[in-house]
């Protein structure tokens, strides 16, 4: 089969054009992927630094809260101890008065009657 030079030139130009477009598309996609990887890396670095700063702030707030809770706990413990001491003193005084009332009532009533009378 005989082909003219013009036909071969058209076929060669078409193949060359397709190869050029294919290589250009491959290079374009490679460039886009490389840019996306660079952006992803920058975002990861920023997120990690943000996480680290957030962790530091959370730790600081947690430390402050634990200190405040400890001081409130100490104050409440002191107040509760003071109330407990006052209540125990009042209960002791009330118990002492109640014992004296029981003794006074027992004196008024006299001795208990015996179940068996002696002969």
Image (cartoon, helix red, strand yellow):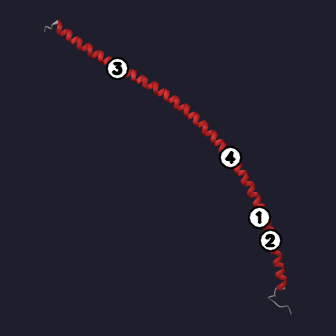
Q: Nearer the viewer, mark 2 or mark 4?
A: 4
Q: Quick one: label 1 or label 4, which is nearer the N terminus?
A: 4
Picture quadrant of residue 76: bottom right
Q: Is residue 42 above or below residue 9?
A: below
Question: In this image, 70 relative to 30: left or right?
Answer: right
Instruction: Measure the alpha-carbon separation of dots 1 and 2.
Output: 12 Å
Q: Quick one: label 3 or label 2, which is nearer the N terminus?
A: 3
Residue at x 46%, y 28% (from the top left corner)? 40
Q: Are marks 2 and 4 in contact (CB under 8 Å)?
A: no
Query: Which label belongs to residue 68?
Result: 4
Q: Are marks 1 and 2 in contact (CB under 8 Å)?
A: no
Quarter of the image with the C terminus in it: bottom right
Q: Is residue 46 above or below residue 13?
A: below
**Direction bottom: furthest residue:** 119
Q: Which residue is mark 1?
A: 87
Instruction: Measure the alpha-carbon separation of dots 2 and 4.
Output: 40 Å
Q: Nearer the viewer, mark 1 or mark 2?
A: 1
Instruction: Measure the alpha-carbon separation of dots 1 and 4.
Output: 28 Å
Q: Position of residue 62 (x, y in %)?
A: 63, 42
Query: Which label belongs to residue 107?
Result: none
- Element class at badge 4: helix
Q: Which residue is mark 3?
A: 26
Residue sitting nearer the eye, 104 or 50: 50
Instruction: Measure the alpha-carbon separation of dots 1 and 3.
Output: 87 Å
Quarter of the image with the N terminus in it: top left
Q: Quick one: label 2 or label 4, which is nearer the N terminus?
A: 4
């Amino acid at each position: 089969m005989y082909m003219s030079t013009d036909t071969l030139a058209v076929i060669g130009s078409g193949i060359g054009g397709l190869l050029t477009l294919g290589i250009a598309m491959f290079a374009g996609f490679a460039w886009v992927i490389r840019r996306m990887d660079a952006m992803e890396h920058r975002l990861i670095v920023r997120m990690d630094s943000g996480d680290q700063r957030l962790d530091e702030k959370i730790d600081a707030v947690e430390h402050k809260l634990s200190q405040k809770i400890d001081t409130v706990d100490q104050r409440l413990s002191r107040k509760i101890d003071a109330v407990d001491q006052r209540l125990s003193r009042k209960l002791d005084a009330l118990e002492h008065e109640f014992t004296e009332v029981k003794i006074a009532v027992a004196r008024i009533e006299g001795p208990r009657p015996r179940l068996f009378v002696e002969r």
